[in-house]
DNA sequence: GCATTTCTCGTACGGCGTGCGAGGAAATAT
DNA sequence: ATATTTCCTCGCACGCCGTACGAGAAATGC
């Protein structure tokens, strides 16, 4: 009689300690915590195991390997971008773009995963699916649907990319962006003769006392609206891009460079407006 | 007497073997070779040293650490994107966009560097400087210059990102994109009920017998032209974006997500056209 | 001839991903 | 109640990694 409650307490305490063993979700959540705190390099199976009160190799029962774990974390945070199911296409595109931006800012490590592992998880797929659906309903046709949704994704992901790099560098150096700005200032000035335009922009921005975070937001919105306007024009008037004439550059070696090919030709893709 | 020529031959042979010692440029070039062949994970100081016929730690005389080496390789390949110095802004933007795309395709590992290390090297700076100059000459004003050039960079980098992921995955699995497509087909079909739009697009694309590489090019061009059109419209009519009204979303926590903040609101950034 | 600078590299340390197989605990079959 | 199977954990070990350190070799300046 007395042994039973005791062992029950024991068992319960154990369950409390690791909640009846590890679970995949638990591992993924802890991995995201660790990634958010220490970045992509900060995640190791040993540290993750320690955080969960488990041995490092115990994780391998629930997850095939580290890459698979990263895929899971990536899709988990894709779940954080909220895309309405039945909105018009501009609203949907805006939600996707701002959602992706928010995801990257909250989890800057993700771009190191997106660029290496294809995103096929359910959360990423629902975001894509809803945007594709919105594009189709809006009147984009055929391949233009892919082009439009890809463009929105590309712009949003690309915007987050340098931002993530700066945030990561600042976190590693332990100081704010403003401090980094003043730190690189002498370097920028030393190169003033070669890059007058960059210098002019740099001083204009830093003298205006503009908050870089809100500046980044305004800039993101500016480009996003421009992109959506351009896509909208093509949606309403598909003739604007007759097949095979949009650009001059539709060969198979798209933009080889001097070193790789010795080819000195310039893309010169775009005719003037 | 006999010792001298012998030792001289020896010395000369040594010089021939590594061309009077290592040099920074030599190291960077070899690193890029290795990265192109084996990807970001394939670069290690030991392998790189072996490739140069040198000890691994010899490299640390010429390069502070691996991150610095990666910065150097990144700027080196930025040197491969060729931007004309005095073209109109659309030409310049097109050259930058296609050049970046070509760079990413030729060196897919670079996105793993771009997202982690800020790009401040001279080659990256000249590309930026020329695009900024072209924007300024074209009539973009004040901060709009930054917004415009950033948008072009973002779009180009973002487009390369998933492409690099796929190429990397294909290289690791050792098979082509078409084979990967058929490999994931059952997975896609199993999820058909949840993602009808994606499935429809997937089957449409794969049944058309379209070459994915040229499809990616056409799509890239489509989005690029749309973006440039949208930016052009803002250039010619800055009123289109009165300060502070472009989007509803200019607060400081731009797009927090459900998990991070508990905030369930949707961005709903964009008013219809 | 010597002193100084410039460069190479062997050794070693701590950390990494993960294959392997021995174990224990719980569920199930008998 | 016992035996068996299934599920899960984890210690050990291997071969890699980045790189700090200091001993030396080679080139250079005096």
Image (spheres, coloured by chain):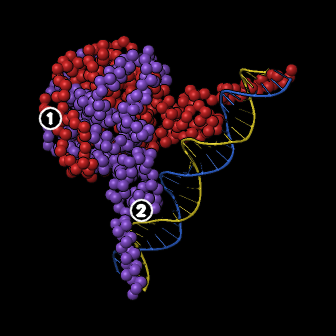
Chain colours: A red, B purple, C yellow, D blue
Does A163 sit above or below residue A257?
A: above
Figure quadrant of the C terminus of chain B: top left
Residue B243 seen: no
Residue picked out by circle 2: B53
Looking at the rendered structure, the secondary structure element under dot 2 is: loop
Residue under the image location 41 percent in, 83 percent down: B3
Left/right placement of residue B82 relative to residue B194 reads left
Q: Residues within 10 Å of mark 1 (few under 14, many from 20)?
A: some
Q: Residues within 10 Å of mark 2 (few under 14, many from 20)?
A: few
Left/right placement of residue C16 relative to residue B111 reads right
Total tally of numbered discs in the picture? 2
Figure quadrant of the N terminus of chain B: bottom left
Compute the Cα span from label 2 to label 1. Answer: 51 Å
Query: Do tags 2 and 1 sit on the same chain?
Result: yes
Residue under the image location 40 percent in, 75 percent down: B10
Q: Position of residue B270 (x, y in %)?
A: 30, 18
Left/right placement of residue D19 relative to residue A180 reads right
Q: Which mark is residue B269?
A: none
Q: Position of residue D27 (x, y in %)?
A: 36, 74
């Amino acid at each position: 009689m007395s042994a039973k409650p005791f062992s029950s307490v024991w068992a319960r305490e154990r369950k409390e300690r690791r909640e009846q063993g590890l679970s995949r979700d638990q591992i993924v959540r802890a991995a995201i915590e660790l990634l958010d705190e220490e970045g992509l390099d900060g995640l190791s199976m040993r540290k993750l195991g320690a955080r969960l009160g488990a041995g490092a190799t115990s994780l391998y029962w629930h997850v095939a390997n580290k890459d698979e774990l990263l895929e899971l974390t990536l899709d988990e945070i894709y779940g954080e971008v909220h895309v309405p199911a039945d909105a018009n296409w501009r609203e949907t595109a805006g939600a996707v773009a701002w959602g992706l931006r928010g995801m990257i800012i909250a989890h800057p490590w993700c771009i190191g995963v997106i660029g290496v592992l294809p995103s096929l998880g359910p959360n990423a797929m629902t975001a894509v699916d809803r945007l594709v659906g919105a594009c189709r309903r809006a009147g984009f046709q055929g391949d233009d649907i892919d082009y439009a949704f890809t463009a929105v994704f590309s712009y949003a992901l690309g915007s987050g990319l340098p931002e993530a790099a700066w945030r990561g560098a600042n976190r590693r150096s332990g100081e704010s962006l403003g401090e980094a700005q003043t730190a690189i200032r002498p370097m920028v000035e030393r190169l003033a003769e070669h890059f007058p335009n960059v210098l002019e922009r740099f001083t204009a921005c830093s003298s205006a006392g503009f908050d870089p975070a809100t500046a980044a937001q305004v800039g993101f919105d500016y480009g996003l609206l421009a992109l959506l306007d351009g896509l909208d024009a093509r949606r309403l008037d598909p003739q604007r891009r007759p097949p095979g004439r949009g650009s001059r550059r539709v060969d198979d070696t798209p933009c080889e460079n001097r070193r790789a090919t010795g080819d000195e030709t310039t893309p010169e893709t775009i005719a003037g407006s």
